[in-house]
């Protein structure tokens, strides 16, 4: 069973790498210029993949996510042509909140340290 898990990780890494390349070179949408893929989670049956992204400009998160999800078919088609997989998963894009949460926790810790020094 561990072998299947390792394969899912390898497929997720492959999708992450190829999608990053596609966003930079094949996409013509200017909103995708500042999109970074943080991780990919592939379902057990390889039919779906959650793609977590961050943006340089947080003010356009919803608009960019909608555009990415509308273009998911294009990315899946291009991915199928570039990667040799039995089934190319359907892509679903989500905003990765972990960076924002990490920054918030860091700010709280700095504030606590500053309060302790006083």
Image (cartoon, rainbow, N blue to C red):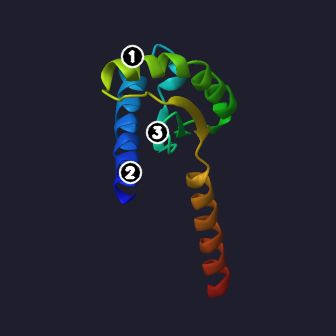
Left or right relative to 47: residue 15: left
Residue 50 placement (x, y as % from top left): 55, 39
Label of residue 4 in the image: 2
> Alpha carbon of mark 1 to alpha carbon of mark 2: how far?
31 Å
Q: Is residue 118 visible?
A: no
Front disc: 3 or 2? 2
**In this view, 88 is above or below 29:** below
| Front tag of 1 and 2 | 2
Task: Name the spot of residue 107 as percent of width and height, x first.
Answer: 62, 65
Residue 84 visible to an observer of this rendering? yes
Which element is circle 2 on? helix
Mark 3 vs mark 2, CA separation in Å: 23 Å
Q: Which residue is mark 1?
A: 26
Could you tell me which residue is drawn at 37 percent across and 40 percent down?
A: 11
User: Which element is circle 1 on?
Assistant: loop
Front one among 59 and 32: 32
Q: CA distance from mark 3 to mark 1?
A: 15 Å
Query: Which residue shows up at 67% across the image and 26% down it?
Result: 63
| Residue extending furthest toward the top | 28
Label 3 neighbourhood size at 10 Å, few (<14), some (14-19), many (20+)? some
Residue identified by numbered label 3 = 37
Q: Quadrant of the C terminus?
A: bottom right
């Amino acid at each position: 069973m561990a072998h299947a898990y390792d394969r899912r990780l390898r497929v997720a890494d492959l999708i992450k790498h190829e999608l990053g390349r596609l966003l930079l070179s094949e996409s013509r949408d200017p909103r995708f210029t500042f999109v970074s893929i943080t991780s990919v989670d592939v379902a057990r049956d390889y039919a779906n993949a959650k793609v977590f992204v961050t943006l340089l400009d947080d003010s356009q998160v919803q608009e960019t996510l909608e555009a990415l999800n509308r273009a998911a078919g294009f990315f899946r088609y291009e991915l199928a042509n570039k990667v040799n997989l039995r089934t190319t998963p359907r892509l679903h894009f989500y905003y990765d909140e972990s960076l924002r949460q990490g920054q918030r926790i860091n700010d709280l810790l700095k504030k606590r340290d500053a309060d302790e020094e006083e």
